[in-house]
Image: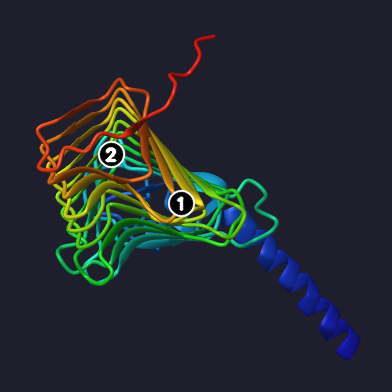
Amino acid sequence: MMKILKLSLAVLTVVLLATTASAQASRTWVSGVGDDLNPCSRTAPCKTFAGAISKTATGGYINVLDPAGYGSVTITKSITIDGGPFLAGILASGTTGVIINITNAADTNSVVHLRNLDFEGFFTGIRGINVISAKKVFIENCKITGFRGNPGRGIDVGTTVANMQVTVKDSTITGNLAQGIRVSGPANNSVSLNVEGTTISLNDNSAVDLIQNARASIGSSNFSQNGSAGVFAEAGTTQADVAYTRMAQNIIAASALNGGVIRLYNSQIVQNSTSISGNVVSHGNNAVINNGVNTLPALVPAPALQ
């Protein structure tokens, strides 16, 4: 009888696991009038991203049926959360909007896409997006504002993952207590940050702050009216290439200290308290005008055309 009972329990466990796995869909849906007890299908949507993610398969999609607030969520597997065609809300009062922490070795892709999302810190939120562990993170057409609880960062990348890639595109990060984007990577394995078409303004600290083991490529963006630097490379393991970007009315437009370097190309540095500080170099094709302290970056040869 004991053998039969053990066999029955084993079979039941397998069935339950199979049922749970099969319950995860490749595409799920949320609605402001949904219910997290639903299966998260289009006709029976869930109410929150947290409710939907457990019912979404690794590598799957969470889509939005109507504009509403869908709550904070912790992401532990490859996933796409897309608020389009709306700008779906994540109200993160006193907490973090999205935590990304993928540690499962079986998730070999380890990639997260966040699109068309409106992160509201409501003056007490601590981070809009906190990236801890993943291989690739894409943040597209998102708004992150009002994160003024400690530490008060728009996007915080603090990771031990080697060679992580983070892309921020066509987004707005504004009105946060500290940095718009802060990046700190593991020793000898830099985080790669790519910022395109993004406005980072009115943050009390820097727009982009590279703490250690980080390199940034920034293009066609606007970093204005921040309480510290537009771009800050803080250590010898940090570097940034900045092209076609406007840095205006910051305390310092670009600052590279302790062996860090910032390279400027076809950018505007105007109306800052100080134009540059430290190891900031230029190809001689930038507009550096009307700053309180109008220091010019060091000239380096223009890149060869091929």
Please name the residue that numbered disc 1 is placed on: 259
The extreme bottom residue here reads 2
**Three-letter amino acid code of the residue under disc 2:** Ser
**Foreground mark, 1 or 2?**
1
Q: Nearer the viewer, residue 192 or 37?
A: 192
Compared across the picture, whether 165 is left or right of 96 comes to right
Q: Nearer the viewer, residue 288 or 43?
A: 288
Determine which quarter of the picture holds residue 7: bottom right
* Residue 200: x %, y % from top left: 23, 44
Around disc 2, counting alpha carbons within 10 Å, would you say few (fewer than 14), some (14 to 19), or many (20 or more)? many
* Residue 75: x %, y % from top left: 47, 59
Residue at 50%, 10% in the rendered image? 305
Q: CA distance from mark 1 to mark 2?
A: 30 Å
Determine which quarter of the picture holds residue 153: bottom left
**Three-letter amino acid code of the residue under disc 1:** Gly
Compared across the picture, whether 91 is left or right of 82 comes to left
Camera sees residue 27? no
Compared across the picture, whether 128 is left or right of 93 comes to right
Determine which quarter of the picture holds residue 231: top left
The number of discs equals 2
Q: SS class of the residue under badge 2?
A: loop
Camera sees residue 283? yes
Q: SS class of the residue under badge 1?
A: loop
Q: Nearer the viewer, residue 219 or 12?
A: 219
Residue at 73%, 72% in the rendered image? 12
Residue at 30%, 62% in the rendered image? 127
* Residue 229: x %, y % from top left: 24, 49
Residues tagged 1 and 2 counted as in contact (Cβ below 8 A): no
Q: Which mark is residue 171?
A: 2
* Residue 268: x %, y % from top left: 21, 28
